[in-house]
Image: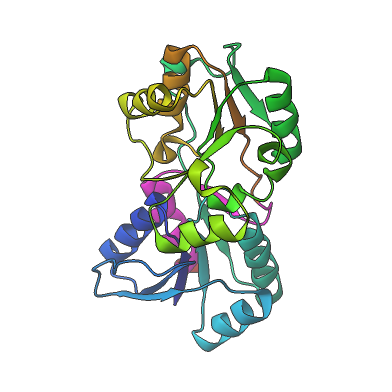
Amino acid sequence: MILVFGGTTEGRRVAGILNGLGKRFIYSTKTQTNSLGYALAAHRFGALNERDMKAFCHEHRIRLIVDAAHPFASVLRETIARTGHELQIPILHFERDFKQAKSSRPESHPLVHFVDGFEKAIRCLCELSPKLVLATTGVQTITPLKPYWSKHKMLVRILPQTTSIEKARAQGFPSEQTLSMSPGRSIADELQLIATYGVDCLLSKESGASGFLPEKIEAALQAEIPIVILKRPSVPPSFKIVRHKQDFIDFFEQLYQES
């Protein structure tokens, strides 16, 4: 059996590939989501600690783990790495497309700031000294960013879900500064949001093309405001990284020929 950690565009791509290959798999997400609609897929949801993940892999005789979770799911990846190492299960990481739009020129433009971690992000924001920051980093980042928003004005865009709204409230974030809405999918969407609220700085994650980072960068450049981008965490060295469908199929076929 194959265990896929998804909940992302990449997770759905992996599910489609496995279904096309006629392989049964379990699709795991942190929160409950709609069914994938594949007869070969079983779906589970809920976070797994190391003990529970090992027990789950034993129970379902997992022979391959596919990591297609969010780029910033560091705790999950650490758990997968330890589980895979102890149970000798190979791990395949389906990499998100992190290429930026050429017009964005993220590496060279003075308005684009890539930073490592929240501490440096907060330091960068303080140095830029904007009047109003829009954070598109999600509800899970509210607490790490508290040293900034407790002293400075910040809007946080979160998903329009009851669980996200409750998490934001539980972390003490001001409800009047919470924007409960779906992520912008175009440059125009982001520009409209910037103009509506008078935002003069964006804070985002290095979430790749499927996270609409190129659109956020281009919107910031067109609005002539800075954007601070949290760099994605590295993938554990034990993970085999693939970026394309054929690479995935090649690895998969080789693995099953050897087993």
Residue 24 image-quadrant placement: bottom left
Give the x, y percent position of residue 66.
49, 62
Give the residues drawn in magenta, as a range: 236-256
Tell me what residue is drawn at x 63 percent, y 36 percent: 231
- Which one is nearer the viewer's eye here, 212 or 238? 212
Residue at x 42%, y 13% (from the top left corner): 222
Tell me the residue at 54%/19% (across/down).
106
Please determine whether, in this image, residue 142 is positioned above or below residue 58.
Answer: above
Give how far across and how far down residue 196 sits, in percent: 38, 26
> Residue 213: x percent and y percent?
46, 32
User: Foreground residue, 241 or 161?
Assistant: 161
Q: Is residue 198 left or right of residue 90?
A: left
In this view, the residue in front, 64 or 169, is 169
Q: Nearer the viewer, residue 250 or 172?
A: 172
Left or right: 77 as drawn, with respect to 45: right
Residue 159 in view, yes or no: yes
Q: Is residue 132 magenta?
A: no
Task: Locate the N terminus by quadrant.
Answer: bottom left
Q: Residue at x 43, y 40 (%)?
A: 211
Image height of 191 relative to 207, above or below: above
Q: How is the image coloured?
A: rainbow
